[in-house]
Image (cartoon, rainbow, N blue to C red):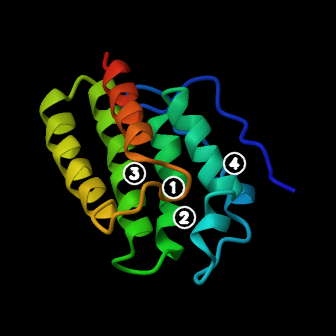
Amino acid sequence: MTRALTLPPRPYLPGKTERPDEAIFEPLKEGLAPGMAPEDLAQSAAFLGGMQAFEQGYFWEAHELWEAVWMVLPPASAERHLMRGVIQLANGGLKARMGRENAARRIAALADTALREAFLQGQDRLMGLGPEDVEKMRNRARNFAS
């Protein structure tokens, strides 16, 4: 049974809003383990909760959930590059939202590098995401700038 993410009333913005209790993420991370198939990870509560958080502009929260997924993926795998890229998109969205445009641009470049690497092996989709989905995420992060 996939657990649902209950988001705090406001996204966490370091130095501006109250940091949520990280315990809210633990139930969503349960069951993640090295060796899990990327297809299973893409259906995990942590991955899906990260997608939900990101879509609603909760970039720090998305990062927290996706990092747990990233950590169990094989090193140098296309899926690990993908997760590094979307984590950086979340980080860049957070920086943009905080008004740190230079940091947001620098992090966007890091995200682009990781995402290019992810799709170098010719897959159309990784963990349910294709280049067009990633582009929508990139635009979403930019649209939440303060």
Q: Gap in Å between the C-alphas at discs 4 and 2? A: 16 Å
Q: Which residue was labeled with disc 1?
A: 66
Q: Gap in Å between the C-alphas at discs 3 and 1? A: 7 Å
Residue 65, horizontal then vertical, whole percent: 56, 53
Q: Which amino acid does label 2 sit on?
A: Val
Q: What residue type is labelled 3?
A: Ile
Residue contact at pointers 4 and 2, CB within 8 angstroms: no
Neighbours of disc 1 within 10 Å: few (<14), some (14-19), many (20+): many
Q: Earlier in the sequence, mark 3 or mark 2?
A: 2
**Front in this rendered view, residue 138 or 90:** 138
Q: Compared to 90, does 126 lie above or below?
A: below
Residue 108, horizontal then vertical, whole percent: 22, 41
Which residue is pictured at 69% across the width and 59% down the height? 44
Disc number placed over residue 104 in the picture, else none: none
Q: Earlier in the sequence, mark 4 or mark 3?
A: 4
Residue contact at pointers 3 and 1, CB within 8 angstroms: yes
Q: What residue type is labelled 1?
A: Trp
Residue contact at pointers 2 and 1, CB within 8 angstroms: yes
Residue contact at pointers 4 and 3, CB within 8 angstroms: no
Q: Is residue 95 left or right of residue 124?
A: left
**Element type where label 4 sits in the image:** helix
Which residue is pictured at 62% across the width and 65% down the height? 39
Can residue 14 be seen by looking at this rendering?
no
Q: Gap in Å between the C-alphas at discs 4 and 3? A: 19 Å
Q: Which residue was labeled with disc 2?
A: 69
Neighbours of disc 3 within 10 Å: few (<14), some (14-19), many (20+): many
